[in-house]
C-alpha cells in the first residue's frame, strides 16, 4: 500500500518528539484511514520505562502534541487515551482521501525542537516568550539568582539520591551510546550531546559500571556529581516547572504542555534541557521505590520541593532549564523509520 505524503509527514512529526533516554517507545501504524500510536513493549523490554510510567505518558503526550501541531486542522478527528495494555492505542487520527493527499506545511517549529545540555547565559528571557508562558495553565517560572538557587538545591538533592540508586544508574548506563557505531543505532543517549569537558566521556564510561560508582560513593562521589549536575541551573535564564494534578491522563497532558513550551522556547532562540530527576524521585517515594537508606533524605526533599514549588494537590512533572546557549548542541538521532512505522494491509 502506498503511504500518502501527509501520513508520512505526521509520522515524521511524531518521531521527532523527545523521549526519556531517547528510547522512542512508540510505534505508528497506518491502515489506509487512520494513523495509530502504540507503546512498543517488545522493543523497550523489561529494563525501559513501562507503558504506564510517568516518563512514557509524558513522552506520548509530546508525540501527540507534535502530530496535532503538524496536522493543524487537516484531519477529521483524533482521540487520545491511556491504554490498558500494549495492544491498545495511545492515540489515533483519521484522514479522509483529500486530507491524505493535501500538501504538508514546511518549516514547522516542532522540527527545530531539541535538547541542549550546554551552559546557558544568565541573559533574561525575551518578553514575547514570557508573555506566552503567562497564557499557559500549569506552569511556574523561576527567575533570578535566589529562585534558581532553590531549584538547583532540589536538583542537587534528587541527584544525590539518584547516584546511589542502583536501578536508576543501571538504566541510565544501558542507554548510553559511545562512539559512531553505537550512536548510529539511532536511539539512546549519545554521550556527545552532554557537552562534556575533556576527559568527561572517559569519566562517564568509568562510572557507568555500578560497582565503580558505589566504590566512588564511599568517598562522596555522588556529592560531587550531583553538585556538577545542579550547577548549570543557577546559571540559566529561568527554570520552568510543569505542574499538574496527579494521574495518567494528566501526565499525557503534562507531556503535551512540556512539548508546546519547549517548541516555543526553541523557536525564540532559547536552549532547553529537561530535568526529570526531582519529579522521578518524588514519584518513586510515593510508590515505595526509594531504597530504605535514602527514604529520610528523599522525604525531606519532598517537603522542600513543596515549599519551593507550591501547588496544592499538584505534582511536579518536569523542570525545564531554559536560556540562551553559548553554542549549538549536538542533535540526537532517531531510529530508522521501519523500526517504528508499519502499514497494516487489509487483505
Ligand atoms: C519524559 C522525559 C524525560 C527526560 N529527562 C531528561 C533529563 O532528566 N535530563 C536530560 O538531559 N534530558 C532529558 N530528557 C530529554 C531526552 O533525553 C531527549 O529528548 C532525547 O534524548 C532526544 O533528544 P532531543 O530532545 O534533542 O530530540 C527527557 C525527555 C523526556 C520526554
Image (cartoon, helix red, strand yellow):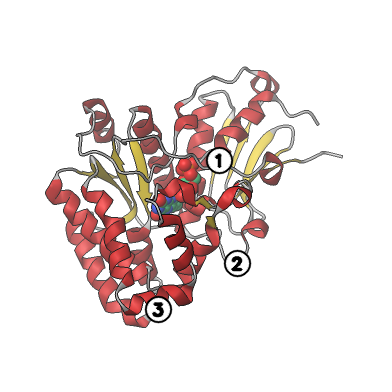
CA separation in Å, label 3 and label 1: 49 Å
Q: Which residue is mark 1?
A: 79
CA separation in Å, label 2 and label 3: 27 Å
Closer to us: 92 or 41: 41
The residue at 35%/66% (across/down) is 281
**Nearer-N-terminus badge (2/3):** 2
Q: Is mark 2 within 8 Å of ligand 1?
A: no
Q: Are marks 3 and 1 in contact (CB under 8 Å)?
A: no
Tell me the tag on residue 215: 3
Q: Are marks 1 and 2 in contact (CB under 8 Å)?
A: no
**Nearer-N-terminus badge (1/2):** 2
Q: Is mark 1 within 8 Å of ligand 1?
A: no
Residue 53 place in picture, x, y as percent: 49, 60
The residue at 37%/73% (across/down) is 164
- Element under label 1? strand
Q: Is residue 239 left or right of residue 34?
A: left
Q: Are marks 2 and 3 in contact (CB under 8 Å)?
A: no
Residue 289 place in picture, x, y as percent: 42, 74
Q: Which residue is mark 2?
A: 46
Which-is-in-front pick, marks 1 and 2?
2
Residue 70 place in picture, x, y as percent: 53, 28
Outermost residue on the bottom side: it is: 292
Say few, some or many: other residues with alpha carbon within 10 Å of mark 3 (under 14 / 14 to 19 / 20 or more). Answer: few
Amino acid at each position: 500500500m502506498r503511504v500518502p505524503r501527509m501520513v508520512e509527514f505526521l509520522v515524521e512529526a511524531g518521531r521527532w518528539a523527545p523521549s526519556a533516554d531517547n528510547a522512542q517507545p512508540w510505534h505508528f501504524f497506518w491502515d489506509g484511514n487512520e494513523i495509530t500510536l502504540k507503546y512498543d513493549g517488545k522493543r523497550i523490554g523489561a529494563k525501559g520505562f513501562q507503558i504506564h510510567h510517568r516518563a512514557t505518558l509524558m513522552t506520548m503526550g509530546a508525540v501527540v502534541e507534535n502530530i496535532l501541531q503538524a496536522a493543524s486542522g487537516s484531519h477529521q478527528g483524533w482521540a487520545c487515551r491511556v491504554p490498558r495494555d500494549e495492544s491498545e492505542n495511545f492515540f489515533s487520527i483519521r484522514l479522509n482521501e483529500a486530507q491524505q493527499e493535501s500538501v504538508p506545511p514546511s518549516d514547522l517549529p516542532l522540527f527545530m525542537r531539541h535538547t541542549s545540555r550546554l551552559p546557558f547565559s544568565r541573559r533574561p528571557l525575551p518578553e514575547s516568550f514570557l508573555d506566552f508562558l503567562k497564557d499557559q495553565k500549569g506552569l511556574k517560572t523561576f527567575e533570578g539568582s535566589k529562585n534558581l538557587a532553590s531549584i538547583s538545591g532540589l536538583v542537587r538533592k534528587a541527584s544525590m539520591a539518584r547516584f546511589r540508586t542502583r536501578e536508576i544508574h543501571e538504566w541510565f548506563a544501558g542507554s548510553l551510546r559511545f562512539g559512531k557505531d553505537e550512536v548510529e543505532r539511532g536511539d539512546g543517549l549519545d554521550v556527545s550531546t552532554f557537552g562534556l569537558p575533556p576527559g568527561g566521556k572517559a569519566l562517564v564510561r568509568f562510572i557507568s559500571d555500578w560497582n565503580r560508582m558505589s566504590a566512588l560513593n564511599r568517598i562522596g562521589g555522588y556529592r560531587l556529581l550531583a553538585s556538577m549536575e545542579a550547577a548549570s541551573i543557577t546559571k540559566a535564564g529561568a527554570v520552568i516547572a510543569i505542574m499538574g494534578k496527579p494521574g495518567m491522563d494528566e501526565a499525557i497532558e503534562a507531556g503535551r504542555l512540556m512539548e508546546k513550551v519547549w517548541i516555543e522556547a526553541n523557536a525564540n532562540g532559547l536552549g532547553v534541557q529537561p530535568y526529570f530527576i526531582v519529579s522521578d524521585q518524588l514519584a518513586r517515594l510515593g510508590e515505595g521505590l526509594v531504597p530504605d537508606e535514602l527514604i529520610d533524605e528523599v522525604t525531606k526533599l519532598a517537603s522542600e520541593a513543596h515549599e519551593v514549588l507550591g501547588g496544592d494537590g499538584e505534582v511536579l512533572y518536569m523542570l525545564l532549564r531554559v536560556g540562551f546557549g553559548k553554542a549549538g548542541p549536538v542533535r540526537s538521532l532517531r531510529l530508522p523509520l521501519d523500526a517504528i512505522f508499519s502499514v497494516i494491509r487489509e487483505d
